[in-house]
Image: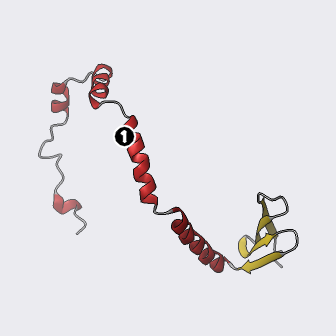
Amino acid sequence: MEIEKKRETSWKIELKNKNDNVELTSVEISGVVRRIKLSVNNRDNSAEVEMNKEEFFNFLSLISAFKDVVIGDDSLIIEEDLNLIQSKVSAPSEVADINEEIYNIDDDETENGFNETDEERLDPEEWDPW
């Protein structure tokens, strides 16, 4: 005989008006989410929808698509942020001077250290996946 464990998780989200809220509930039986409830409540009325996991994921996809319509394309936001970052960056020559002072590297050492012999080179036939 197997005992089924039931766990219910609820989030109650209050909106600006204290009498209005959204409630999300997940019902898990034996470690598997079986039901998801979404309810919207105000003083006088309430609406509750119960979904299985697949229906909930479809609902999330619709909400995500609607968010993109309302907010717009994310790439525009990223470009605006990039422009702000670029305007705040100092001149590249200053950064190069600082790096040269901190990391004093002898060019002869790097050239000698990275010379490859024929034995160390990879043969394309050995690693080419195609």
The correct choice, above or below, for 82 with respect to 6 in the image is: above
- In the shown orientation, is residue 84 left or right of residue 5? left
Q: Residue at x 22, y 69 (%)?
A: 130
Tell me the SS state at disc 1: helix
Image coords of residue 56 (percent x, y): 65, 76
Q: Residue 123: name its quadrant.
A: bottom left
Q: Nearer the viewer, residue 91 or 34?
A: 91
Task: List the residue tagged with mark 1.
Answer: 86
Image coords of residue 116 (percent x, y): 15, 41
Q: Amino acid at mark 1?
A: Gln
Count the labels in the image: 1
- In the shown orientation, is residue 84 left or right of residue 4? left
Any part of residue 28 in sight: no
Point out the image quarter for the N terminus.
Answer: bottom right
Image coords of residue 64 (percent x, y): 56, 68
Q: Residue at x 32, y 23 (%)?
A: 98
Which residue reaches farthest top? 101
The correct choice, above or below, for 92 with respect to 53 in the image is: above
Q: Nearer the viewer, residue 103 or 77?
A: 77
Which residue reaches farthest left? 118
The correct choice, above or below, for 85 with respect to 17 in the image is: above
Q: Residue at x 63, y 79 (%)?
A: 54
Image coords of residue 77 (percent x, y): 45, 54
Q: Nearer the viewer, residue 29 or 41?
A: 41
Q: Residue 99: name its quadrant.
A: top left
Q: Residue 113: name its quadrant.
A: top left
- In the shown orientation, is residue 111 left or right of residue 10? left
